[in-house]
Image (cartoon, helix red, strand yellow):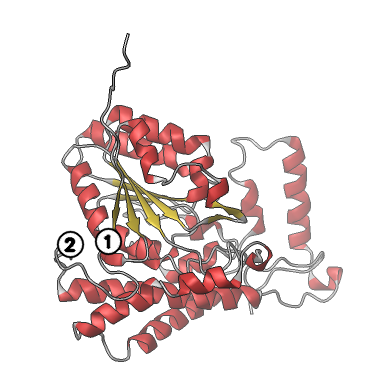
């Protein structure tokens, strides 16, 4: 019997509207108001300046380890901008700019990265999940949210973020399959920043694109220039509208680059070259969008100073917050503490009750730092 072609040849599209040289495809340019364009640029600038400030805070021992976003502002904000407040956002661990856009106070995120439990808790009115550190584990949860919205007849859309490394996890494939089978209102946003810590994309997959992985699960996939905020917005808007209309999920692959470290515990000079970073710096999403706005006379004077002052005020609020209660780490481990954990909790409580005279000089410890044995955790 002859072989029969069951499907036409699959095609995966790449979308770019504003390239790194400033060339604009006017036919594809999304219709965004001047106010929206200014808001997008301000949010991207805030994300960049906050990122740089957080690196300094971490190096000073004032917050703990975190994952910088430098270079990925367009991928995050071009997509998050398309959501309503009633929609759901499911972040991984590198969505600081998107979270601020969604209403997370900066000082709350700083509390999270300094070990405060409440820093990771969304406000009651927020339709966001907390930061997720284990890779890809948030994706089945995102499908569950979308399935619940579909079941209840809500018109809410869920947008889930993850990196290229997450596509090597079983959770990613299970979530894609579940989403495709149940046709849920979900937008998968992969920030393909070329590196899963020190593992390059070429060692993650033999597929030419990540977007094409959607085809195996019966849903559309598109690759976009992740440093082009206009392209990310256009693709995300289309995917969100499709999901809200009941036409199911979409996978968006944003091709971008992590200009900084994987986390502040990482040294990328061990596995990538300066030449590679310099090449991607020429494609900086912030520089590109700024040039676009300059041509349209939409840049605001003094915006950098406004953003820096907003961040500085948030840092001041963060550093006047009460110290974290170390005993809180025992509260949500088990419904009933095991004898071993009970003993550990009692030992820590006893140390907390100890006075400085019992333990030596108490000193002070910066927010987020770990006190030395016998040292009380206090604020400056």
| Residue 205: x %, y % from top left | 51, 43
Find the distance from the CA under tag 2 to the CA under tag 1: 8 Å
When asked about the image quadrant of residue 303, the answer is bottom left
Q: Name the residue located 74 percent from the left edge and 61 percent from the top edge.
A: 352
Q: How many marks?
A: 2
Residue 92 against residue 111 in the figure, above or below: above
- Residue 339 left/right relative to 143: right
When asked about the image quadrant of residue 355, the answer is bottom right
Q: Name the residue located 33 percent from the left edge and 72 percent from the top edge.
A: 43
Q: Which mark is residue 28?
A: 2
Q: Which mark is residue 231?
A: 1
Q: How packed is label 1: few (under 14 Cα within 10 Å), some, or many (20 or more)?
A: many
Tell which residue pokes out farthest to the front in this image.
2
| Residue 228: x %, y % from top left | 32, 66
CB atoms of marks 2 and 1 within 8 Å: yes
Q: Closest to the observer: 208 or 86? A: 208
Tell me the SS state at disc 1.
Answer: helix
Q: Name the residue located 31 percent from the left edge and 34 percent from the top edge.
A: 147
When asked about the image quadrant of residue 195, the answer is bottom right
- Residue 161 left/right relative to 263: left
Tell which residue pokes out farthest to the top in this image.
1
The answer to whether any part of residue 298 appears in the image is no
Quarter of the image with the N terminus is top left
- Residue 239 left/right relative to 270: left
Q: Closest to the observer: 18 or 366? A: 18
| Residue 298: x %, y % from top left | 21, 83
Residue 78 against residue 327 in the figure, above or below: below
Quarter of the image with the C terminus is bottom right
The answer to whether any part of residue 29 appears in the image is yes
Residue 174 against residue 87 in the figure, above or below: above
Dot 2 or dot 1, earlier in sequence = 2
């Amino acid at each position: 019997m002859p072989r029969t072609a069951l499907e036409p040849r699959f095609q995966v599209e790449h979308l770019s509207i504003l390239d790194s040289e400033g060339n604009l495809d006017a036919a594809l340019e999304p219709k965004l108001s001047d106010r929206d364009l200014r808001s997008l640029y301000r949010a991207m600038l805030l994300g960049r300046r906050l990122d740089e400030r957080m690196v300094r805070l971490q190096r000073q021992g004032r917050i703990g380890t975190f994952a910088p976003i430098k270079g990925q502002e367009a991928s995050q904000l071009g997509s998050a901008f398309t959501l309503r407040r009633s929609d759901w956002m499911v972040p991984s661990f590198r969505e600081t700019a998107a979270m601020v856009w969604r209403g997370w106070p900066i000082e709350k995120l700083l509390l999270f990265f300094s070990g405060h439990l409440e820093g990771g808790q969304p406000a009651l009115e927020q339709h966001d999940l907390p930061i997720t550190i284990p890779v890809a584990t948030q994706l089945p949860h995102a499908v569950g949210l979308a399935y619940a919205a579909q079941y209840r007849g809500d018109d809410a859309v869920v947008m889930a973020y993850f990196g290229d490394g997450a596509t090597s996890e079983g959770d990613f494939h299970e979530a894609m399959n579940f989403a495709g089978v149940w046709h849920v209102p979900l937008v998968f946003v992969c920030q393909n920043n070329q590196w899963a810590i020190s593992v390059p994309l070429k060692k993650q997959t033999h597929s030419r694109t990540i977007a094409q992985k959607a085809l195996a699960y019966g849903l559309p996939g598109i690759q976009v220039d992740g440093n082009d905020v206009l392209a990310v917005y256009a693709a995300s808007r289309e995917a969100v509208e499709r999901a809200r209309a009941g036409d199911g999920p979409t996978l968006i692959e944003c091709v971008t680059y992590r200009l900084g470290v994987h986390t502040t515990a990482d040294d990328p000079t061990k596995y990538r070259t300066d030449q590679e970073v310099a090449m991607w710096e020429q494609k900086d999403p912030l520089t590109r969008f700024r040039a676009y706005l300059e041509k349209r006379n939409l840049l605001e004077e003094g915006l950098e100073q406004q953003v820096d002052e907003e961040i500085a005020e948030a840092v001041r609020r963060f550093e006047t917050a009460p110290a974290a209660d170390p005993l809180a780490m025992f509260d949500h481990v088990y419904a009933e503490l095991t004898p071993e954990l009970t003993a550990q909790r009692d030992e820590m409580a006893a140390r907390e009750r100890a006075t400085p005279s019992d333990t030596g000089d108490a000193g002070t410890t910066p927010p987020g730092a770990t006190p030395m044995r016998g040292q009380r955790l206090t604020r400056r």
